[in-house]
């Protein structure tokens, strides 16, 4: 009799996609018996375990889909090394509320100050908050859009990049862009505007964007959309790695200045 019931429970778990309950049935029943649970408590234990397992899977999958280049987290960020960043502002971004509102984030700063680290950390937190995220470098994104344009498949590619609730475009401005690139990026920004959030990291202040894109009009139109509802973080200071090396006595002050 119990064997039949057991088989039926397992079969129904499978049908209902309750993978965790199915695989941990004995452990859950043991716990319930050890803790003298009543029926409602047992049901609560079983459902909570399944919900937690599904949430965990969803986050793992979301992080895979986001294609972060390295597994950086906000917990690893050394706030004392970067006094120009307000931890409260980053924690607010990490709640994902800005994505719920379709607002944008711009991270400005010289190389090595933690822009990519913060972008990935915020991105992971946004996945945990339940939103889809995609991370691309500006170079990768523009190469993909340009190839799609040449292949007559631009519309599909734009639709693909328009989809994630948060698109992180890393390292805008490390290269200069021609008018075609500027126009492609504008089309994407325009598609996402008001519908989904974009987080951009860049070493170029907005006053240089006209020169960076070789087109003041397109740069102004892009900034107009990006800045309408946006958070801007301006990160200052020297490269984190240089600072660490200098502190460890591995660089003389002259080398550190030359390496900047
Ligand atoms: P950027 O994108 O601004 O050029 P990165 O985010 O790539 O800089 O940072 C360079 C390296 O230094 C990375 O390995 C990053 O994790 C580390 N780093 C930068 N700032 C910090 C910080 N405040 N705390 C911990 N690690 C940091
Ligand atoms: Mg970077």
Image (cartoon, rainbow, N blue to C red):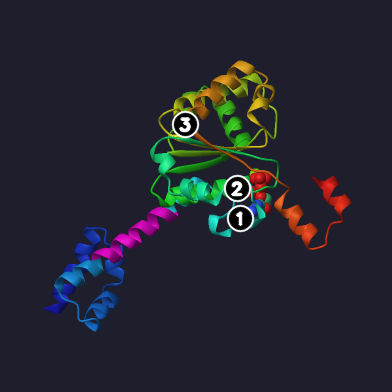
Residue 69 versus residue 226: which sits nearer the camera?
226
Where residue 222 appears, as percent x and y from the top left, is: 55, 24
Residue 58 versus residue 80: which sits nearer the camera?
80
17 inside magenta stretch? no
Residue with the mark numbered 3: 229
Q: Are marks 2 and 1 in contact (CB under 8 Å)?
A: yes
The residue positioned 46% from the left and 39% from the top of the image is 166
Above or below for 124 versus 226: below
The residue positioned 19% from the left and 77% from the top of the image is 37
Residue 65 versus residue 125: which sits nearer the camera?
125
Above or below for 51 versus 175: below
Q: Is residue 113 left or right of residue 56?
A: right
Asked if residue 173 can be seen in this view, the reply is yes
Magenta segment boundaries in residue numbering: 47-60
- Disc 1 element: helix
Mark 1 residue's CB less than 8 Å from ligand 1: yes
- Disc 3 element: loop
- Per the model, the C-alpha gap separating discs 1 and 3 is 26 Å
- Per the model, the C-alpha gap separating discs 2 and 3 is 20 Å
Residue 85: which disc?
A: 2
Residue with the mark numbered 1: 79
The residue positioned 24% from the left and 64% from the top of the image is 47
């Amino acid at each position: 009799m119990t064997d039949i019931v057991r088989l039926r429970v397992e079969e129904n778990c499978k049908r209902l996609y309750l993978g965790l309950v199915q695989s941990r049935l004995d452990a859950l029943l043991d716990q319930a018996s050890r803790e003298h649970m009543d029926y409602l408590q047992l049901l609560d234990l079983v459902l909570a375990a399944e919900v937690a397992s599904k949430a965990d899977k969803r986050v793992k999958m979301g992080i895979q889909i986001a294609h972060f280049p390295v597994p950086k987290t906000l917990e690893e960020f050394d706030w004392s090394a970067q006094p120009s960043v307000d931890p409260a502002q980053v924690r607010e971004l990490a709640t994902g509320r800005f994505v719920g509102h379709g607002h944008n984030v711009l991270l400005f700063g010289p190389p090595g100050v933690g822009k990519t680290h913060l972008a990935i950390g915020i991105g992971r937190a946004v996945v945990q908050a339940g939103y889809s995220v995609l991370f691309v470098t500006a170079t990768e994104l523009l190469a993909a859009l340009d190839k799609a344009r040449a292949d007559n498949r631009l519309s599909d590619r734009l639709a693909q990049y328009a989809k994630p609730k948060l698109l992180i475009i890393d390292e805008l401005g490390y290269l200069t862009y021609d008018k075609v690139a500027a126009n492609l990026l504008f089309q994407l920004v325009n598609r996402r505007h008001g519908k989904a959030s974009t987080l951009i990291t860049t070493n170029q202040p907005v006053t240089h964007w006209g020169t960076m894109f070789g087109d003041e009009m397109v740069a102004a139109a892009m900034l107009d959309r990006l800045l309408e509802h946006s958070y801007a973080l301006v990160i200052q200071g020297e490269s984190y790695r240089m600072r660490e090396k200098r502190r460890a006595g591995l660089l003389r002050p002259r080398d550190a200045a030359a390496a900047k």
